[in-house]
Image: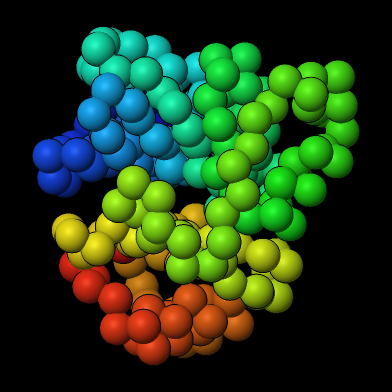
Amino acid sequence: RGDGVLFSTELSSDLHLVTDSGGRVNSLIKINGDKITAFGASNNEELAEQMLKFIDNYFPNKQLESVHVSHPHADEISGLNIYAKEGATILADQYTISAIKAHEPFKYEINSFKFRPINNEQTIDGTTFYVLETMRSKRQSFAHFKNVGIVFQSDFLHIPFDGHIPEVIPNYTRTFIDLLRDKQLNLKRII
């Protein structure tokens, strides 16, 4: 585990990788004018609160507008109530939105959540979203930043901390890799 102190690495003028010393949770911040969209930042309430403080400290003239959720597993959505209180819109496919609405811990505050459904191959503010059907989660999405060749994904790829290459990969990883190849996406880095 890391020290919990978030820091940013600028990947391009509008994309920043946010992580801590352990690198266990990687989030991405996309800046669009005075608005910010966060990717991979809703794993739990503590991370969500840290991310809001990080944005206030490092991007004081910008406001968090939206948060992308890749799929509806609890470890991907547990911090969404923090963002909802701040008025951020949740970007997710319709299946994931339905699952978030049914998530028991949100039952008393779900009416304050704002959603914007995303569809497969939809582009919003220069980010193209892909929504796949996988065996891991009925629907699972990722974001592609074409201009810089970066893909932000959550749980399609798992890289062991010891760096070894697995001999067998799960079906959902194969689905992801096949789509990257089939679409011939501009790709320099996967986060």
* Direction from residue 173 to residue 110 in the image, left or right: right
What residue is drawn where x is 27% and y is 34%? 32
In this rendering, is residue 61 above or below 83? Answer: above
Say whether residue 3 is visible: no
In this rendering, is residue 29 above or below 158? Answer: above
Quadrant assignment, res 160: bottom left
Say whether residue 142 is visible: yes
**The N terminus is located in which quarter?**
top left
Residue closer to the observer: 113 or 38: 113
Q: Position of residue 40 (x, y in %)?
A: 47, 43
What residue is drawn where x is 65% and y is 74%? 133
* Direction from residue 155 to residue 19 in the image, left or right: left
Q: Position of residue 142 (x, y in %)?
A: 47, 60
Residue found at the very far left of the displayed protein: 13
* Direction from residue 160 to residue 134 in the image, left or right: right
What residue is drawn where x is 59% and y is 42%? 116
Q: Position of residue 19 (x, y in %)?
A: 33, 36
In this rendering, is residue 32 above or below 132? Answer: above
Q: Position of residue 12 (x, y in %)?
A: 13, 45
Name the image colouring.
Answer: rainbow
Total number of numbered discs in the rendering: 0
Quadrant assignment, res 131: bottom right
What residue is drawn where x is 32% and y is 36%? 29
**The C terminus is located in which quarter?**
bottom left
Residue closer to the observer: 75 or 121: 121
